[in-house]
Image (tube, rainbow, N blue to C red):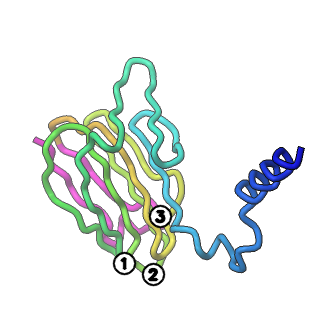
Amino acid sequence: MWRLAVLAAALLVTACPGGRGQDESRASPHKTSTTTANSQSVPERSTTINPGSVVPAAAAAQMVQVQLTEYEIRMPDALPAGPTNFHIANAGKRNHNFAIEGNGLQMKLSSDLTRGDWASLIVELKAGTYTVYCPVDGHRRRGMQRVLTVK
């Protein structure tokens, strides 16, 4: 009987992380999300596959670093075709977002990134030309747009 009580107490302590003496929201990593082509935003490390489309897991996709600042998108101008994981970081002072359109693809992050935040956007890139831009309040008009060539 006492073993059952000890086991229950151990499970309770493990399941309830309270009492750590700090605000968990401040200690946790910046918000992240993974969005896959032709799907809604899903928690990181998850992949949604819609019928008729094949979306690779993040581990199988090429990683492309993207940095958003006032009013610039820093990333390569050309990429090879295939599964691509855009790792997008907001290095600016204002909120930013990331959208990609072209060749039948139209995707954006499900929410804006605040300063220091990052997110992943996983897409299947086909050969062709794409436009990447920041869809936040006129940022595109201010220069946060570029052309991406996929070969």
State the separation of the CA atoms marked 2 and 3.
13 Å
Residue 50 in percent (x, y) is at: 45, 25
Residue reaching furthest to the top? 52
**Which residue is at a point 18% across and 44% down the rendered structure image?**
129
Which residue has dot 1 on it?
Answer: 70
Image quarter where the N terminus lies is: top right
Magenta stretch containing residue 111, yes or no? no
Residue at 45% from the left image edge and 48% from the top image edge:
34
Q: Split into 4 quadrants, where in the image is the C terminus?
A: top left
Judge depth for marks 2 and 3 and give the one in front.
Answer: 2
Q: Quadrant of residue 107?
A: top left
Q: Residue at x 47, y 33 (%)?
A: 48
Q: Amino acid at mark 3?
A: Val
Q: Gap between marks 3 and 1, in whole Å?
A: 12 Å
- Residue 92 location in percent, x, y? 40, 78
Lower position in the chain sequence, tag 2 or tag 3? 2
Q: Is residue 45 above or below residue 103?
A: below
Dot 2 surroundings within 10 Å: few (below 14), some, or many (20 or more)? few
Residue at the farthest right position: 1
Residue 90 appears left or right of 145: right
Q: Which x, y percent locates residue 49?
A: 44, 28
As shown in the figure, which amino acid type bears the numbered disc 2? Lys
Nearer the viewer's eye, disc 2 or disc 1? Answer: 2
Residue under pointer 2:
93
Q: Are marks 2 and 1 in contact (CB under 8 Å)?
A: yes
Q: Is residue 151 rendered to the left or right of residue 7?
A: left
* Range of residues picked out in magenta: 129-151
**In the orientation shown, which residue stands out farthest toward the left?**
151
